[in-house]
Amino acid sequence: MGRVGKHSAGKAAAAGESPPPSDRRPLYFAAFLLLSDAALVALIVAFVPYTKIDWDAYMAQVDAFVEGERDYTKIEGDTGPLVYPAGFLYVYSAIKLLTAGQVFPAQILFGVLYIVNLSLVLVLYVKTEVLPWWALGLLCFSKRVHSIFVLRLFNDCFAMTFLHAAMVLFIYHKWYLGLIIFSAAVSIKMNVLLFAPSLLLLMLKAMSIKGVFFALLGAAVLQVLLGMPFLLSHPVEYFSRAFNLGRVFIHFWSVNFKFVPEKFFVSKELAVALLVLHLTTLMVFAHYKWLKHEGGLFHFLHSRFKDATSIRQFIFARPKLSTLSKEHIVTVMFVGNFIGIVCARSLHYQFYSWYFYSLPFLLWKTRFPTFVRIIFFVGVEVCWNVYPSTAYSSLALLFLHISILFGLWSSPAEYPYANGKK
């Protein structure tokens, strides 16, 4: 049911009439999309040549791990050293066990993963009711994303599937289990941390301080357990490689800043400027958009102290309004991640999977006319399919990103709670 359906149901209830029957078109269309895309994925695997990029390196790194190597600085592949947390090794060790390291069965496995991920994303879209039913089809119209999953076999695919699974749990207010799944996603690839500021804010709105602490503790314990074989023997090497936040990517592969001269691209000045811009934009959105109904960021934080009459109440009491709406949860998560994408120094081709599935949602959260939303969606897809990227394609992509972010900024903030009055 789209926004028109929601509003008409509300008017009917206000007038004392029975609301119209639920519009089941989104569910039927989502099922159709899953079946159609499953057929398309099968055709791609069968007839489109596999592209060798990182698979051999992944398998070499897994071999070193299985053979007993625990020094992260010595686990390498033909494309370089291992730079992912330990969850990556467990996932790809399981894949190698299932596929014997062969590409074709791995493609079938990733095809199944693609459909699982799409199913999770469709749950988010159908439950939030932000898009009209027909616009769900946009989620299946990316040549690049199909390639990332079934022709490249990147670990980004597993990381984002776990992330979307965590978000499904969040919209049903399963915060503790959701944090465990979120932590598992981080253990496969650190890009998931782009969602972390938004998630922390949502937890502070929905949970007691005690609840937030124990949810974060559970996530941290999982990281320790996964990394234990390396932490017990070579902890410094593990942290320096698996959680290296200062990596400098190669200018040639940049999709979003190819127009920047290489000398400036690798400079600390650009890195610091983008980091400051990232944090500032998050703060501004948190204050004026995500916490608008609570009086802003600082008023919200102050109220958590002011409303408590004792230390015990401060730690154990939840906010008066704490049941967040599904739309608000998904909005804050997707927009927070998108801000990180806009401010990222370098986006490689596989990084498109980090935010592609949020694009239709973000576009329909703006006030842009529908035809403009479609143009922006197609424009982003075209930019990601220019290979190698050029100064013009990266400038166009940056323009589209900033335009979408401006559209999100200028759109009204949704009421964040499922309980209470609007």
Image: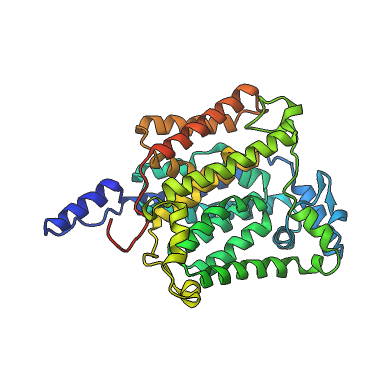
Q: Is residue 80 left or right of residue 172?
A: right
Q: Residue furthest top?
A: 392
Relative depth, front residue between 392 and 315:
315
Visual colour scheme: rainbow
- At x 57%, y 47%, the residue is 42
- At x 39%, y 38%, the residue is 366
Relative depth, front residue between 197 and 292:
292
Q: Is residue 148 left or right of residue 302?
A: right
Residue 282 makes an appearance in the image = yes
Q: Residue 184, position in %: x, y?
A: 63, 62
**Residue 15, placed above or below residue 358:** below
Q: Residue furthest bottom?
A: 312
- Asked which quadrant contains residue 385, the reply is top right
- Asked which quadrant contains residue 10, the reply is bottom left
**Residue 74, placed above or below residue 343:** below
Question: How many numbered discs, if any?
Answer: 0
Q: Residue 177, position in %: x, y?
A: 54, 69
Q: Residue 132, position in %: x, y?
A: 34, 44
Residue 43 makes an appearance in the image = no
Relative depth, front residue between 92 and 393:
393
- At x 58%, y 42%, the residue is 278
